[in-house]
Image (spheres, rainbow, N blue to C red):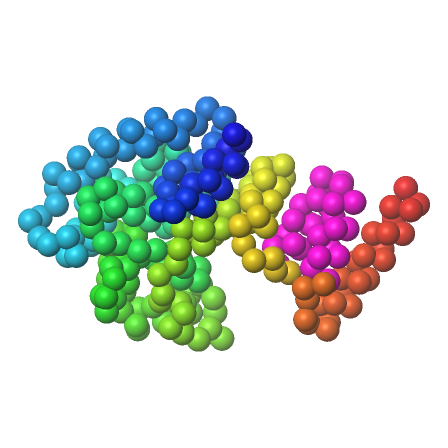
Amino acid sequence: MSARDHCLACLNSEQPALFEAALWVAAEHDPTVQPKQLLHELDGLKHQVDSGLPSLPPQELAQPLLRRLNDLDFHEDDDSPVRPQAALLHTVLQRRRGQPLSIALIAMELARRLNIPLQGVNFPGYFLLRVPGADHLLDPCGGRRLYTRDCRELLLRYIGPQAQLGAEHMQACDARSMIVRLSRNLRHLHLQDENYLYALKDAERVLQLATPNVADHLARADLYQRVDCPQAERFDLQRALLLCDDPALRVRLADRLRQLTAATALH
């Protein structure tokens, strides 16, 4: 099976293998990545983390686990601009630097192995974690507790003054949603890095896993435009037009399709 097939199989299993799925995403970009070997090697990190945890009930160990990872030098990547290595799990494990989602994926896998309850939260702009039933969320990069006021401030920082905090922002998300978010992150980072073929792989994975929407089809259409593939670009523009319910955007999409058709005919 291909790396993509392995990723999908991990997500479609009765008990989704989230961390392994994320490793297969990395393997799709770097054929030297061996997910099974990395899963085995994570035992060493598990023992390092476990040896520094206090003697508390499992439901009280999520924050100490995150603080222990921080002590072991796992931090948010502060490179500017952020590079794809901050989202690819094998390089995050090597460098101990990554985006909040990537650090969270490592923390969640360690928590699973240590029987510590921990869930992902698809918070806008910054991925967070939660303990089921807790009255706060957790920052994966260091373990800081975030209460409602903190979450509102975080939302305003990343989304803008028009943002309204809702209950949906605080809910746990499933494995598929996390791999979709990882894929969108990589699509953006590879585009920023001008690696359009890699960005296309991520864009295709998003459309395989997520409910189709205008933004994801337009993102892939723009990538096809950059690699001079008008037939594929036209397909995504047509799909975006079918899904679009914004009248102004529909006009722009129809105009872009007409211009693309005329240019292709002339060519």
Q: Is residue 30 left or right of residue 112?
A: right
Residue at (76% x, 41% y) in the render: 229
The magenta span reads 215-241
Helix, strand or loop: magenta stretch:
helix
In the figure, 137 relative to 57: above or below?
below
Write down the quadrant of residue 126 in the picture. bottom left
Q: Is residue 76 visible?
A: no
Q: Residue 266 location in percent, x, y?
A: 93, 45
Residue at the extreme right: 266
Write down the quadrant of residue 153 in the picture. bottom left
Q: Residue 155 location in percent, x, y?
A: 41, 67
Q: Is residue 68 visible?
A: yes
Report the front residue among 88 and 232. Answer: 232
Residue at (51% x, 46% y) in the render: 183
Q: Residue 54 location in percent, x, y?
A: 9, 48
Whether residue 228 is in magenta: the answer is: yes
- The number of callouts visible is 0
Residue at (87% x, 48% y) in the render: 263
Residue at the extreme front: 14
Q: Residue 221 location in percent, x, y?
A: 69, 50
